Image (tube, coloured by chain):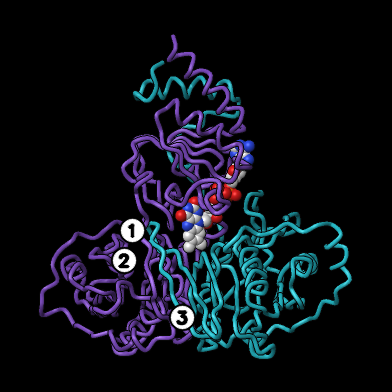
Chain colours: A cyan, B purple
Amino acid sequence: MKILVVLRMIPDSAGELELTSDGRGIDREWLDFQLNDFDDHALEEAILLKEAAGATVVAVAIGEGSNRVLQMAVARGADEAIALEAEGDGMIDSRAIAGSIVALARSKAADLVLCGVQSTEDLFGQLVPYAGALLSWPHVSGSSRLGADGSALRVTQERGGGIAATYEIALPAVIGVQTASKAPRYVSGSKLREASKTAIGKAPSEPAGFERSAEIVALRLPGQRGTGENLGDNPENVAERLANILAAKGFAGV
Amino acid sequence: MRIVACTEGSFGKLEPLSLEMITAARAAGTAGDEVVAFFAGQDPEPAIASLGVADRLIAASAGNSQLIAADPYARLLADAVAAEEPGLVLVPYSANGLDVAGDLAARTGWPLVSYVNEIIRDDDRLTVVAQVYGGKILAECSVPLPAILMINPGAFAEAERRDVDASKVQHRDAAAIVAEGKVRLIGVDVPSYDSVDLTTAERIVCVGRGIGDEASIDIARGLADILGAEIAGSRPVVDSGWLPKARQVGKSGQKVKPKLYLALGVSGAPEHLEGMSKSDLIIAVNTDPKAPIFNVAHFGATCDLFDLVANLSERLQAASSR
Ligand SMILES: Cc1cc2nc3c(=O)[nH]c(=O)nc-3n(C[C@H](O)[C@H](O)[C@H](O)COP(=O)(O)OP(=O)(O)OC[C@H]3O[C@@H](n4cnc5c(N)ncnc54)[C@H](O)[C@@H]3O)c2cc1C
């Protein structure tokens, strides 16, 4: 089995996000970029499948810091590393990169494409259904467990309300990973150093071929902070106020 | 214009967000527009008994399957869209919607905007407001029609539940499409509430990734015990195995509405807010003053959660032993 796993580098949303002067993008100059969490789980699931059933794992990364993350992927067990050229330096638009991923899935003769169920930049749609539909392969988003069984895949998908459905899917397929079957592993410094010698391939960007798309008119920060009261940042003051609030509302006997 | 509003349900229940899609469709429409509800599932009865506010209902049912996977759902929807030629298709942001919206966009080539909160109609275009970066940024987008929008749960109110007139229902038998599909349902797991049912809890203390590690959960559990609250977690906390799945709040966990919800180190991503924003009293502690949890909190504090929990636990304990 050949698995293509997609790794997207996205701005750390726990950090401060500021808008560019034209108001259409976020200022990327001082941002930290990190691997999309769900893609990290997709990588782990790919390696787990390789260990359980035997597979070749091709990791493809896009965005700032791709090389670093590809080395990490190789250290964790990926067999091949490819940096995908990005169009411009703005958001990684899954609708726009779907064409490149589909081209790579074909040229690498992949049986399975794995990527995170979503990214925080998926404004114009998610990669899994785009790639699946463009390839005419079945796709399932939101997996929490994957297992290979010959030419079929067993996928457990999280639905709402804690309900989980398990499907059997004929390969080839595209799966959007929500949670890997096991938490992503750590890699040792020595493995990382070893992996830093790996040659990183390059792939050009390919158009997905969509004629019409929505476009961003303006970005803004949600101005209104709700109607809540800010108790500040001094833990003693906050604790005192909260103790009183909880008591007044009958939650604690102060 | 015709607007197709996608709805869903299983186990004899219609998902409440189905009714939100009808409201969203009315918001996007102008007088004279026709709103067609689309349903695919095992049993169409709950849809027929609820979606009367729409002008018509297309009800695809597959008696042979407890739950319809997104793969057959998307194919049934594509057929309906080809027949109805709508100007707009609304899909809820749900596990199913995540697969369905992009699939339809790829097949039709139509524009798609996800995570939409607001829709404004300008003749042959829409202006929509969507959430990106975990709710930290709002994107105003211009969308040429026909188009597809994936709508955030809770962004629109539920339409009134009403029967659909029998003459307005078009039934479709989906059993063959489900049976032939490449995605075959082999099992459904419904959570057992033997240990805990958060949906009936009156007080909840929820820990997010800010709690740092498994051992620290005990600190929050201590405060929960003092308050007589259940302990709960965000997705990353449950994924890490620090709390059982039955204690996850949010889109793929439980939707809760306690009298008290204390969130410690939870950022308040839309998928988390979906599960708790209707709680009576929400108190949030997060060192990031821009964390979206503060948009729904009644009281917020930006101090370190460990300092706060230590202080507050001590105070509450001292008060109760007095
Ligand atoms: C289909 C789908 C379904 C999902 N379902 C769910 C779901 O059911 N439930 C859910 O929760 N998520 C769900 N998510 C995930 C969701 O998008 C977020 O990733 C998740 O809610 C983030 O969890 P968090 O707030 O704990 O972590 P983070 O976003 O990492 O936030 C941690 C927060 O802790 C704060 N912090 C750190 N240290 C401290 C400290 N010492 N003191 C105070 N504050 C601190 C940080 O400022 C940060 O805001 C789903 C996502 C998808 C795509």
Q: Chain of mark 3?
A: B
Q: Rounded to the nearest whole Å, what is the CA distance between mark 3 and mark 2?
A: 19 Å
Numbered marks: total: 3
Q: Residue at x 35, y 81 (%)?
A: B87
- Residue placed under numbered mark 2 in the picture: B21
Q: From this viewpoint, is residue B7 visible?
A: yes
Label 1 Cα crowd, 10 Å radius (few <14 / some 14-19 / many 20+): some
Q: Secondary structure at mark 1?
A: loop
Q: Are marks 3 and 2 in contact (CB under 8 Å)?
A: no
Q: Residue at x 28, y 85 (%)?
A: B175
Q: Earlier in the sequence, mark 1 or mark 2?
A: 2
Q: Residue at x 56, y 21 (%)?
A: A237
Q: Earlier in the sequence, mark 3 or mark 2?
A: 2
Q: Which amino acid, mark 3?
A: Asp
Q: Secondary structure at mark 3?
A: helix
Q: Quarter-wise, where is residue B99 in the image?
A: bottom left
Q: Chain of mark 2?
A: B
Q: Quadrant of the N terminus of chain A?
A: bottom right
Q: Which amino acid, mark 1?
A: Phe
Q: Position of residue B128 (x, y in %)?
A: 44, 66
Q: Which amino acid, mark 2?
A: Met
Q: Are marks 1 and 2 in contact (CB under 8 Å)?
A: yes
Check the image and report above or below for B295 versus B137.
above
- Residue placed under numbered mark 1 in the picture: B156
Q: Quarter-wise, where is residue A22 in the image?
A: bottom right
Q: Are discs 1 and 3 located on one and the same chain?
A: yes
Q: Residue at x 42, y 23 (%)?
A: A245
Q: Chain of mark 1?
A: B
Q: From this viewpoint, is residue A221 visible?
A: no
Q: Secondary structure at mark 2?
A: helix
Find residue B103 and name its label. 3
Q: Position of residue A225 (x, y in %)?
A: 49, 42
